[in-house]
Image (cartoon, helix red, strand yellow):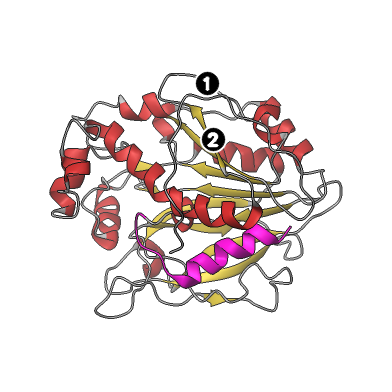
Amino acid sequence: MSTSSQLGRTYNQTHVPRRHTPGKRRFSIYISWSFPGEANRDVTELDNRFSTMLEVRRVGWPAFEAPRFSDPLLFQRGIAGSLELFFLAWVPFQQVVGEITGHPVAVYQRVDQAGTKLPLDERVLADTDTLLVFGLDHMVTQQETAPEEIEAVRQFLTREGTCLIIGPHHDVGASSDLKERDMEYAHHGDALVPRQQRFGTYTCGLMRGLGVPVENRYGLRPASISGTNRITPLSAMRDLDTCGWLHGVTNFNFHMHLPHYAITTDDTKSIHVLARQPIDLSRPHPFTEAGNREFNMFVWMPPSGARAGHILMADSTIFSTLFGGDESLERFWKNLAVIG
C-alpha cells in the first residue's frame, strides 16, 4: 500500500475549509457512531459491542503484542483502544486519496471522544465532494438520523460532481432463533464478533430518507484463496460499470463478516449491483442454505432527477487496512479519487 512521510498528528482542531479546486475532489469521512457510547458499553454484556483491547490481544495473539498496543502508557485500554485501531487503519486510504487530490481527507464523528456532537450538516458537507458515511454504530446506541440531516444530504446531492458512499456494516444475529445465531457465528469464525452484533441504525435511516432501496443483512464470510487470507476475485458486472469505478480492480480485501446489500426494489434501472463476492461454502449459513453462493458487495445508484450525485454502497472495511490490502484495493481507492 502507498505510504507518505509521517507528519505531526493533530486532534481537537476545528476543520479548516478546503477550497474548491477544479478536478481535485474533496473527501470527507463521517463515522456514525458515538465514540463514548461505544467505548462505555458494559464489557460484561455478551452482545452488541466492540471488543476490548484485552480481547483483541488475546484472540489476535501475537499480532498486537508490540509495545505500541500492549503498553498502557502508549495505547488506550478497553473498548476505546479497539476503536482507535479503526482510525489507524484508515490512514493509508487517507494518504492515497490525499496524494491524488491535493486535499486532506477530513474525518468526522457523530459524537467524538470529547463528547462533541456533530450532526451531518453543512459543517461537513460544504467543502465535500465525496462523502463516505461509515455505519459503525451499534443499534443499541440509537443513533437516529434526523430529518434535517437527510435533507442536508439530499441538497448536497443536487450539486454536480458529488458522490455519497454509504457503508452500513454487518447485521449479525438478527434472528430470534438462537440456533440460527450460532450457525452465523460458526460461519464467519471470528471469536471477537458475538452471536448478535447489529449495526447501522444511522445509515439505514439515511438510506430510507434518500430512497435508497437497500438493506444490510447478515455477516458473511467471503471465499478466500486456498492457504491464504486473500479474498477471491469479485464477480464484477463490468458492462454496467459505465463510470469505471472497478476499472483495473479484481478484488477488495478479506474480512470475516461482510454485509449483503440486499436490493429491495424491482427497478433495475435506478440501482445496479456492480460486484458480488463468492461466499465461503465450507461453513453453513442461512443465506447459503437458501441457495445463495454470492452476496452483493458493491452497489451503484446513478444520478436521477434532481439528484446530480452518485450514490454507492460499500462497506467501511474496504477503506481500511486493518484486515489487509493490495494493489487492487488501492486501485479502487484511486478510481474513487478521480471519478465524479
- In terms of secondary structure, what is the magenta stretch mainly? helix
Query: What label sits on residue 84 in the rendered view?
Result: none
- Judged from the image, the secondary structure of the residue bearing numbered disc 1 is loop
Percent position of residue 127, x then y? 71, 37
Amino acid type, mark 1 = Lys
Residue 292 in view: no
> Earlier along the polypeptide chain: callout 1 or callout 2?
1
* Total number of numbered discs in the rendering: 2
Query: What label sits on residue 202 in the rendered view?
Result: 2
For the N terminus, the image quarter is bottom left
Percent position of residue 246, x then y? 61, 71
The residue at the point 72 percent across, 53 percent down is: 24
Amino acid type, mark 2 = Tyr
Q: Nearer the viewer, residue 245 or 306?
A: 245
Residue that carries the numbered disc 1 in the rendered image: 117
Q: Which residues are magenta?
A: 322-340
Image quadrant in which you'd find residue 313: bottom right
